[in-house]
Amino acid sequence: MLRIRRAGVVAATAALMVMIAGCAEKQTEGDSGTSSGPIRIGAVLDITGAGASLGVPERKTLELLAKQLNDSGGINGRQVELIIEDNQSTEDGAAKAMNEMVSKKVDIVLGASRTGPSLAMRAIAESAKMPTISLAANVRIVDGATWVFKTAQNDSVVLENIIDYANSKGWKTIGLLRDASGYGEGVAETLTELGKPHGITVSQIEKFAPDATDFTAQMINIRNAKADVNLIWGIPPAAALAQKSYHQLGITTPVLQSHGIGNQVFLDTAGDSADGLVAPLGRLLVADQLPDSDPQKAVLTKFLADYRAAYNEEPSTFAGHAYDAFQLAVEAFKAVGTDKQKVRDYLEQVNGFVGITGVYRMTPKDHSGLGKDALVLVTVSGGKWQLLPTS
Amino acid sequence: MTDLLQLLLAGVSVGAVYTLVAMGFVAIYTVSGVINLAQGEFAALAGLVAISATGSGLPLPVALLLAILTVVVVAAVMQRLTIAPVKRMTTLLSIILTLGVSTALKAAMLLIWGPEGHGLTPFPGADFTLGGVAVRAQYLWILAVTALMAVAVTWFYERTLLGKALRACAEQPTAARLVGISIARASLLSFAIAGLLSAVGGVLASPVYFSAWDSGLALGLKGFVAATLGGLVSIRGAIAGGLVLGVLESLVAGYVDSGLRDAVAFIVLIVVLVVRPGGVLRQHSVARV
C-alpha cells in the first residue's frame, strides 16, 4: 500500500515539475538604474498568444536595434541592456510583467503590443512614475496619461482616413466587424462621430474574439446588413481568416481593413482573398513605391535593408512601432540621461522625430504625436502591398 | 433559410473535429479510467507536423501519414512513460499526470514551431456554392473522413474480437484478465487509438481552423465536453455530442451573440453535470471501475 501511495506521489510531483518547467521564465538579475553601467530598457511584448504576429517582429526589431547600438558604442559610452518579457497576450500577464520591470528598476519600458495589455500596464506606469512607450493603437492608452506614450497611430487617425475614403467613394453606410478585445473597443463610436458631418453611419456591428477561427455567423449578419462598404477591424491571423471567410461566402461589397494587418502573416493567411481590399497603413510596407521626396523614405529604406539582412524576411508595420519606441527612448537618453522625470519631459516635447510609423510631434495633450498623414491608403494585388494612387 | 443552412454547415464541420477528439477521450477512459488532458495537444501536434512536412516538400498524403504516425507514437510513448508505471490509477491522478504531459507537449511545440499559428494547405478540391450556401471543399473532407472514422471505430468496438476485448477491460477488468486479456496492452492500444483519432482531427482541421502550439487547449476542452454529453463511456454518445456542440456554438454565434461562441461549451458542461451527470444519452449511470 505504501509503495503504491509513493508511486502516486512521485508521479504527481513529476507532473507538477513538468508544469513548473513549462511556466518558468528567465530571470534577469540586475542592480538599480544609476548614471553608470548599462542603460536598461525593459520590453513587455505579446510574444505568445493572440498577439504573436505583432510581438515576434517587435522582439526581433528591438534585439536588432540594441545590437546595432551597442556595436557602435552605445549611448554616451554606456551600453544598452534589453530585458524582454512575454505577457502571453493577456492583461494579467502584462500587469505582472510590468510590475517586474518596476521592481527591476529599468530605465524605461516599451510595450505592450496590443491595446488590452497596454491598458493593464498604464495604471502601473502612472503610479510607479515609469516612462513607458506602448506599441498599441487605442487612444485610451495615452488619453490623459502623464508617463505613458505610444508609437502606433491612434485609431481615430486611422478612422479619419477611412471616413475620407468612404466619403470620396460616396459610401453612406458601413458594416463593422470588429475585434472584441481592447483593440476594437470604441471603434464604432469614433466612426459614428467622425462620419456624422458626411452623413456616414455604422449600420451593423459584429464582433469576434482575437483568437477566433470561424467567422461564418458574423459574415452572414454582415452580408444581410447590406452596407455600402464593410470594415474588418482586427489583427492577423484573425483579420486574415475573416477576410478569407468574407471572400468565401461570396460577399462582393467593397471591404476595408484597419492598420492592424500590416504584416506578411496577413498576406500569407488571406492569400487571394486579400486582393482588392483597402486599408490605411504605415509607409513601411510600400517604402519602395514612395517618391524620393517623402520625408520618411531614408529612414524606411535603411531599416528595411537592416531587417532583411538580419532576419531574411520583410519587417511588418509592428516592427516599425518597436523601432520608433526604441529610437525615441534612445533620443531621450542621449539628450537627458536616465533620470525618469527628465526622460518623460523630453518625450513630451519631441517635435519632428522621423520614425518608421510617421513624423512624431508630441504635446502634453497628445502622447501619440501622429496625425492623419502617418498613414497611406494601401491595397493588395497579387499578394503584394500596393500604394493606392491619391485621387 | 440559406443563413440557417450556412450556420449548420459551419457548425457540423467544426463539430466533426470535436467528435474526433471526443472519441479519443472515450477510447482511453473506457479502458483505464484515465482522462487524458493531452488529447487536444495530440491534434495540435498532428497539424504542426503536417505543416512542417508539406513545407519541406513532401506530398500532402505522405505528410498526413507522417503526422498521424508521429502522434500515434507520441501517444504510445506517453502511455508507457506516464500511465503504465502507475500501479493503481485513479481518475484524479490521471488528470494531474496528463495535465503535466499536456503542458510539456505545449512547451515543446512552442520551442519547435514558435508562437505563431499556421494553416496546412487545404486538401484538393474546389470550393463551390450550392443553393446560396458557400461550401468549402475542406468542410466536405472533414465530414467525409469523420464519418468514415466514426463508422470504423464503432465497428471496431462492437464487431471485432480485439474491440470487444477492450470493452471487456472496461466492464470487468478481473474477468478480462482471467480470460487472458492483458490490461496493460489494452491500455497501450487505447492510447494509440486516441492518438490516431485526435491526429486525424488535427490535420483535417488545420487548413480551416489553424494549428498553433496552444490551439490544443480549446480543442481538448470542447472534445471533453462533447464526450461528457455521452457520459464519457459511449462512442456513439461522443459522436452525437461533438456534432451537437458544434451546431449549438454556430447557432448561438449567429442568432444570439458572436461573443458567446466559446461560452456555449462550458454552459453545456455545467448543465450536463448538474442535470444528467451520467450523460444526456444514457438512461442511468453505471457504476465505474
Image (spheres, coloured by chain):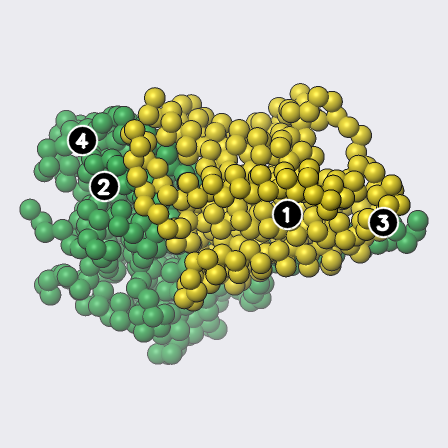
User: In whole angstroms, how far apart are the C-alphas of marks 1 and 4?
Assistant: 49 Å
Give the residue number, with chain letter if any, for mark 4.
Answer: A228
The answer to the question of whether label 3 and label 2 lie on touching residues, with beta carbons closer than 8 A, is: no
Instruction: List the residue tagged with mark 2.
Output: A256
* Residue identifier under label 1: B194
Q: Please state the chain letter of the residue tagged with numbered disc 3 in the rendered image.
A: B
Residue A171 visible from this viewpoint: yes
Please, what is the three-letter code of the amino acid marked with disc 1? Ala
- Mark 1: secondary structure: helix
Seen at 58% across and 27% down, the residue is B268
Q: Along the line of sight, which residue is nearer the eye, A51 or A193?
A: A51
Q: Residue furthest left?
A: A391
Q: Residue at x 57, y 30 (%)?
A: B240
Mark 1 Cα shell of 10 Å, populated few (<14), some (14-19), many (≥20): many
**2 vs 1, front mark:** 1
Name the disc covering residue A224, or none. none
Label 2, label 1: how far apart the Cα atoms are? 43 Å
